Image: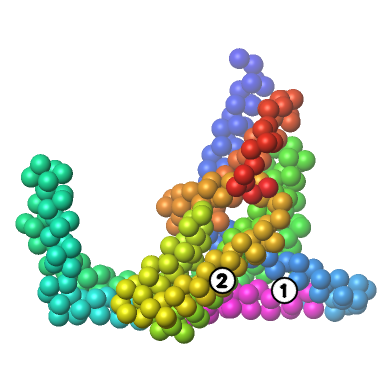
């Protein structure tokens, strides 16, 4: 082993150690960088459009750019956080009210679903050859206990959030600070990132373009459409005096990502419940309006926003979102499908690099988002 080999090995070891150190240093701020990058992609077109209007030779050009970047960063974060705080407060009140009313109703109606539960218990007992007897489990008392514990846990979570308000505000400050510098120095920071990644520049540029497209298309084609549907559902639920309208609207937001069923998984049972409880006309009207204003909107807006941009089956998108949320929490709402699409992009780049041309079946495209 000559001296050059030893030197190369030592240099590689130092590089790995420093890389691990850099990752550990920046890992606590991963969420800040992620959401700052996403917000930058969404609001940077507005920033660029305003900057282009400014006189290029003005001595105040730099100052105006910085001021506008700061205002845009602060307003963007404030608008989003204000909505989140308002939704969180309303959600807490409605969830607490629903749990309280459910507990009171079950306590005041001890015979509620007794006949149905007895039939279910007998069926399960027969199927299990007498091994499972629900009658001995005292399910009703356990449900009451669960509802009581849920109310206490809801209060505990709220108290915990209030206690962590300091770290929350610090995170917001970091987000505004990062978004500001992304706006004014985005090109420089991106070029710096390109320099330190040991991949061919053309490939990095393709991945960067794909990352930008995924962010815009996921927001416009999925998140924005789901937000519009949830907003319309909230208005509709409120007009029909559905208790917990905000709770059901938020659940409906996530159900819109489910293929085929979509938002109907929420408004359908609500309308049927109205009919069963005696409000036949109101229930039918609710179902008709929900189908027209909520679910039909999905079929109109999503193809309009997506067009031919995301070549991925909606079922894969759905499970990518679920898997992403289960692994990364709220970040997974975007990270899940983004990782899957970037993986397929890298796979295509690998095929191109090695001259591989996998056969593609262009005839079976039913249900595929091209």
Report whether 242 appears left or right of 169.
left
Residue where numbered disc 1 is placed: 69
The image quadrant where one finds the N terminus is top right
Residue 320 x %, y %: 51, 49
Report whether 20 appears left or right of 308.
left
Residue where numbered disc 2 is placed: 292
Q: How many marks?
A: 2
For residue 284, say whether it is visible: yes
Report whether 139 appears left or right of 77.
left
- Front one among 237 and 354: 237
Q: Residues within 10 Å of mark 1 (few under 14, many from 20)?
A: many
Q: Which residues are magenta?
A: 64-90
Residue 261 is one of the magenta-drawn residues: no
Magenta: main secondary structure:
helix
Report whether 240 appears left or right of 122.
right
Q: Is residue 204 above or below residue 286?
A: above
- Cα–Cα span, label 2 and label 1: 41 Å
Residue 257 x %, y %: 51, 58
* Callout in the foreground (2, 1): 2
Q: Residue at x 32, y 73 (%)?
A: 276
Q: Which mark is residue 108?
A: none
């Amino acid at each position: 082993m000559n001296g050059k080999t030893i030197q190369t090995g030592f240099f590689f070891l130092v590089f790995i150690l420093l890389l691990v150190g850099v990752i550990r240093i920046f890992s606590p701020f991963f969420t800040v960088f992620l959401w700052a990058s996403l917000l930058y992609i969404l609001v940077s077109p507005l920033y660029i459009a305003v900057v282009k209007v400014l006189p290029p030779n003005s001595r105040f050009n730099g100052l105006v750019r910085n001021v506008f970047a700061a205002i845009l960063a602060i307003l963007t974060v404030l608008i989003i956080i204000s909505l989140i705080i308002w939704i969180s407060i309303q959600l807490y009140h409605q969830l607490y009210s629903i749990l309280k009313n459910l507990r009171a109703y079950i306590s005041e109606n001890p015979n509620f679903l007794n006949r149905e539960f007895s039939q279910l218990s007998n069926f399960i007992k027969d199927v299990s050859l007498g091994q499972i007897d629900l009658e001995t489990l005292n399910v009703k008392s356990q449900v009451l206990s669960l509802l009581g514990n849920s109310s206490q846990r809801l209060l505990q979570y709220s108290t915990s959030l209030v206690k962590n308000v300091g770290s929350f505000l610090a995170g917001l400050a970091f987000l505004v600070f990062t978004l500001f510098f992304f706006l004014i120095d985005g090109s420089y920071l991106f070029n710096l990132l390109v320099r330190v990644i040991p991949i061919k520049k053309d490939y990095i540029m393709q991945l960067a373009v794909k990352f930008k497209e995924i962010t815009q298309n996921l927001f416009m084609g999925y998140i924005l459409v789901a937000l519009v549907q949830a907003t319309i559902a909230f208005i509709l639920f409120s007009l029909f005096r559905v208790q917990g309208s905000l709770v059901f609207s938020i659940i409906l937001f996530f159900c819109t990502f489910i293929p085929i069923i979509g938002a109907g998984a929420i408004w359908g049972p609500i309308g049927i419940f109205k009919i069963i409880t005696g409000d036949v006309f109101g229930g039918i009207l609710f179902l008709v309006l929900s189908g027209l204003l909520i679910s039909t909107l999905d079929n109109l807006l999503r193809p309009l926003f997506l067009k031919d941009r995301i070549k991925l089956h909606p079922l894969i998108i759905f499970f990518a979102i679920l898997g992403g949320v289960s692994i990364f929490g709220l970040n997974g709402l975007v990270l899940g499908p983004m990782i899957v699409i970037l993986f397929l992009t890298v796979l295509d780049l690998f095929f191109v690099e090695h001259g591989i041309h996998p056969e593609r079946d262009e005839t079976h495209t039913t249900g595929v988002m091209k």
